[in-house]
Image (cartoon, rainbow, N blue to C red):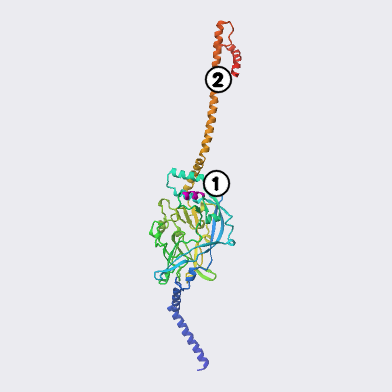
Amino acid sequence: MPRSSCAVYGTAITGVILIVTGVALLVAGVFQNIINKRLKGEITLTEGSKVFGTWKNPPPPVFMEFFFYNVTNPKEFMEGKKPRVNTMGPYTYREYRPKANVTFVEDGKKVSALTPKTFVFVPELSAGDPSKDNVTTVNIPAVAVMNKLKDSGFWVKSGMSMFMGSLGTTMFFTHTVNELLWGFEDPLLSRLHKIKPEVDEKFGLMLDKNGSTDGEFVYFTGEQNYLEYGRIDTWKGQKLMSFWNTNQSNMINGTDGSAFHPFLTKEERLDVFTADLCRSIHMLFEKEVKVKGILAYRYTPPRAVLASGKNNPENEGFCLDPANCLDDGVLNVAVCRKGAPVIVSFPHFYLGDKKYADAIDGLSPVHEHHQTYLDLNPTTGVPVRAAKRAQINILLDRSYFKLHKLLTIAFIAANFPFILVALGVILLLISILLYIRSCQKKVIQFDSFFFLLLCLSQTTAKSETAYSPVCAKADDPGEKNGTYVGLSPVEKS
């Protein structure tokens, strides 16, 4: 056989063997199983693993953007008109969140850690200066105080309203972005702090948050089961919360959003616990995306997450007052905000009942701008991009307008001494006028009496002298003018 023919046959046989071997390996999944096994061993929260270092100190920059709704017509709103707002921001802060106090427990099956968060302002990514830009918004401390007294009697509310009025407390206040975020000393809270030391004299949406943690978390390492990688076992020492009405609502499910198990599928539901909401939410696959050339699955919270209990029975436990349950798209978190009437939603009430956005001029929910999402690489479960978006609202309801009326009462009460003085002056003037009028009547009566005496004396004199009388009879019209003239000097006296 020619040498060339041998080469042809040899090459063909080798090709067939490689094809068969490749197909066999592909069908058997040998290499895929090896890769999967290697990944499962590397993606664990254990010392020396590929992901442990980045879990302890996340390298990708995290930015927190704050936007504020500035109320432009507070006076008109108090008169019953629709509130009108304009959006201010973003005010951007670089967020650093390295893990601290990392400790392995239960023979390395779990790991505990704290996550202190530090915020540093980034002016080049911000729309203004937070130390100078003023925002007019609802007086949250005042509403919170009155909300505490909502079940109290009229006199208690009135007393508090007078107290608030004496401090100059109004339904709206204006403060800088820095003050609203990081805190300022509120006059009302300061006075209450002297009476009840447990009341913080400062108010701020992010008060004491810079450098603080959400409490200790204990996570599963995923070493025994890759599906448990990063899953939360306990939060603040509890496996179950006690804020809500049902065990289902109080469950601590899933991860904290910073880590997910490898080999994600489009069909699975991802559970995420967020301490800001004091509850767990879930996310579903939406679409495939690419982030800098890396394939990712986008997971987003569906409408059911913040649906009302009547539209999603799973959420019935989040309504603590069955007579006043809220509609879709909002969550009352007052129970874990020291009783402050805080309502959380997605920005512009995205995925919420249409009536909420329609009630305020200046809101317009847009899917691309207001949705929360996680872009995760399906092979490793590593987040390659994420956006957590939330809106903080204050529940006003009817108590808001009751407070306005009570503050009006408080204003009157605070000026009560002046009112008494004014009333006293008015009454004194009235009494003087009445006295003058009374004196005038007495003068007329005295003149008539004097006239009568004069007539009588003159009549008596007539019997003694034959002088003609000045007084005329009442029925003698011819003598009236002469009689009036005769008495005119007396009327002028």
Region of the chain picked out in magenta, as a range: 187-194
Q: Who is closer to the viewer here, 89 or 456?
A: 456
Cβ–Cβ under 8 Å for marks 1 and 2: no
Measured as percent of width and height from the top left, residue 42 is found at: 46, 74
Horizontally, residue 127 falls left or right of residue 392, namely right
**Which quadrant would residue 477 be assigned to in this image?**
top right
Q: Which residue, as the protein is rendered here, is positioned at the far bottom? A: 1
Q: Circle 1 — which element?
A: helix
List the residue tagged with mark 1.
Answer: 75
- The amino acid beneath tag 1 is Lys
Give the mark nearest the N terminus, 1 or 2.
1
163 up-or-down from 344: above or below: above
Horizontally, residue 428 falls left or right of residue 273, namely right
Residue 157 is tagged as none
Measured as percent of width and height from the top left, residue 344 is found at: 48, 56
Horizontally, residue 232 falls left or right of residue 433, namely left
Residue 444 is tagged as 2
Measured as percent of width and height from the top left, residue 192 is found at: 47, 49
Measured as percent of width and height from the top left, residue 379 is found at: 47, 72
Crowdedness near tag 1: few (<14), some (14–19) or many (≥20) residues, C-alpha within 10 Å = few
- The amino acid beneath tag 2 is Ile
10 up-or-down from 173: above or below: below
Mark pair 1, 2: CA separation? 57 Å
Characterize the magenta stretch by its predominant secondary structure: helix
Quadrant into which the C terminus falls: top right
Crowdedness near tag 2: few (<14), some (14–19) or many (≥20) residues, C-alpha within 10 Å = few
Q: Who is closer to the viewer here, 284 or 122?
A: 122
* Residue 85 in sight: no
Q: Circle 2 — which element?
A: helix
